[in-house]
Amino acid sequence: MKDYANPLFLFLVVGAMAWRSLAGSEASATQAEVWLLTLCAVGVVTNGALALARAIMHRPSLAKVVWAVVFMVIGCCAWVTRLTPLSEEQAIYAEQSNARQNPLIADEEGESLFTRAAALGKTADVETILNTASPTLEQMAAAALRAAENDKVDVLILLARHGVSANASVNGTPLLHAAAQNAACEAMDWLIMSGALPDGRDEGGSTALMQAAMSDSAAAVKMLLGRGADPKLRDMDGKRAADYARSPEVAELLNPGL
């Protein structure tokens, strides 16, 4: 047992820090945390490598070889997990969340903690804001738009329970169009199944199928066609969805046989 006391200690420390990361600490790691975790990870990997070398040289049981490999894998995974950089949206969300500001107040980009939570698929946070901040229907629709763009169906379902229609629009953009622009197929499918019109128009006269063609997503185009979207419809410029296709695959889907 004494031979594994030091590796076991490192294993527990790295495991605890990895758990903290996975359990919801979304702020960027502090410099001290970076150095501490790096030290722990290097220690675990080093101990694992040495144990593996001893195991191979002295030909002991297979269990010791497996144990050594486990140490190395845990060390590497914990290090990568904790130090993986946050996306820009995640970083802004973490900053706003830590500031404990009003979750409905928009920043200079027109985004609030509420809409960012929806975009990131943080269903629990969205539900907390719904229950404590009492957003208006317009604010909930804005959050739904961000959820649709990012294919966060769970958030859409939650917002629908609070009164947001699948046919809701934000600044002239229906939720289905926002999802189509970003090839968010699961969100598109859920919206249509929940009552969104496959051939509904945005303020510019475009259909979701036209938006899917612009995004050059064959999967999104197939899904909309399968749900009854009409490829023959034209927008205010007289163009059909096929006119916006940017790849032969999408063009073929919208003009079969040509």
Image: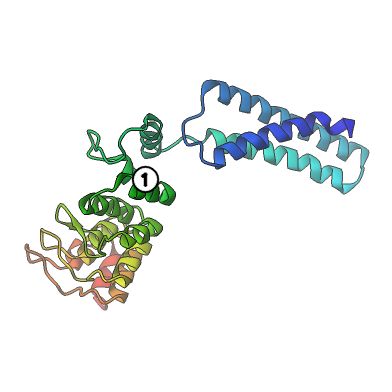
Q: Which amino acid lies under the numbered mark 1 shown in the image of this protein?
A: Ala
What residue would you read off at disc 1?
Answer: 117
Nearer to the camera, 121 or 151: 121
Nearer to the camera, 53 or 80: 80
Residue at figure coordinates x 25%, y 59% from the top left: 175
Color theme of the render: rainbow
Please state if 170 lies on the left or on the right of 127 as rendered. left
Residue at figure coordinates x 62%, y 28% from the top left: 37
Locate the C terminus and report the quarter of the image it occupies: bottom left
Q: Is residue 53 visible?
A: yes
Residue at figure coordinates x 59%, y 22% from the top left: 35
Relative vertical location of residue 71 with respect to residue 188 in this rendering, above or below: above
Position of residue 212 measured from the top left corner of the image (x, y, whole percent): 26, 62
Please state if 14 lies on the left or on the right of 34 as rendered. right
Residue at figure coordinates x 6%, y 62% from the top left: 237
Relative vertical location of residue 95 with respect to residue 56 in this rendering, above or below: above
Nearer to the camera, 111 or 40: 111
Crowding at mark 1 (Cα within 10 Å: few <14, some 14-19, many 20+): many
SS at circle 1: helix
Q: State which quadrant residue 156 falls in.
A: bottom left
Q: State which quadrant residue 90 falls in.
A: top left
- The number of discs equals 1
Locate the N terminus and report the quarter of the image it occupies: top right
Position of residue 132 measured from the top left corner of the image (x, y, whole percent): 35, 45
Q: Is residue 118 visible?
A: no
